[in-house]
Amino acid sequence: MSVDALHKIPLFADVEEEDLQQIAAASVIRTYAKNSILITEGDRSSSLYIILDGQVRVFVSDEDGKINIVNRLGPGDYFGELSLIDDEPRSASVEAQTTCKVSILSGSFFAGYVEQRPRMAVRLLKNMGRRLRNTTVHAKNLALMDVYGRIASVLLQSAAEEDGRLITSPLTQQEIADQVGSSREMVSRILKDLRAGDYIALDGKRIVINKHIPDRW
């Protein structure tokens, strides 16, 4: 991994050149094909993964294979830091949604690095706090919102402005269902109703939000 590539990772912003060279030397670069599992829930491992290119989804599952998507990550994001801190099994699985290129740092190296650099520890804690807040919102939505409200929330959270349009990242109906804890058929019916009302439109696998989605349906 090059020092220039590390400079683009928010986690290593403002890190001195000498430190970046050490991190680059300790990194192992791997490429994963689409649908590959990078981390499995329950595994005992302690590496830190930094996404250089591609998209992944973070999910939990039950014994019947039913899954719930808790996060989506892209270039510049990282995962696996919890096991570095508490030495517990992986709390979720991570799957490549596209071909992914990642940099992997061993737990022993990164733990030693952070111990000597309090600013890095604070940066990790801030990001963990942000993710915990997102997880809390996700749990709240599952507990208190109906299926329609959860779908509307996913669409809004996944959307960003692009060429004057508010448009989501690529989403399949099954992925939305996995994220909101519902069936694909229910998602299909609600999206069909929203399209009929001209609230949304399809652009390939992405969804364009044409106007404010009602809070209730």
Image (cartoon, grey):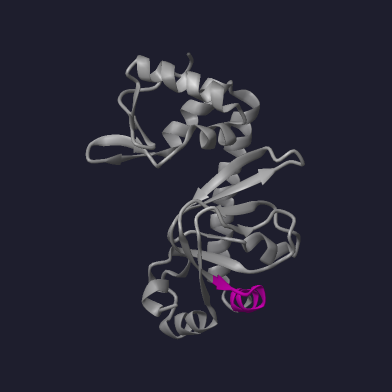
**Residue at 58% in and 51% down:** 129
Q: Position of residue 101 (x, y in %)?
A: 46, 65
Q: Position of residue 130 (x, y in %)?
A: 54, 49
Q: Is residue 33 above or below residue 168?
A: below
Q: Looking at this rendering, what residue extends furthest in the left direction?
A: 163
Q: Position of residue 173 (x, y in %)?
A: 49, 32
Question: Between 85 and 88, which is closer to the camera in this rendering?
Answer: 88
Q: Is residue 11 above or below residue 3?
A: above
Question: Between 71 and 40, which is closer to the camera in this rendering?
Answer: 40
Q: Position of residue 112 (x, y in %)?
A: 64, 78
Image-based side of 116 in relation to 8, left or right:
right
Q: What secondary structure is the magenta-colored segment mainly?
A: helix
User: Which residues fall within the magenta stretch?
Assistant: 104-114
Image-based side of 13 in relation to 209, left or right:
right
Image-based side of 41 in relation to 203, left or right:
right
Question: Between 60 and 186, which is closer to the camera in this rendering?
Answer: 186
Count of numbered marks: 0
Q: Is residue 177 above or below residue 58?
A: above
**Residue at 50% in and 60% down:** 33
Q: Quadrant of the N terminus?
A: bottom left
Question: Between 45 and 192, which is closer to the camera in this rendering?
Answer: 192
Is 13 colored magenta in this rendering?
no
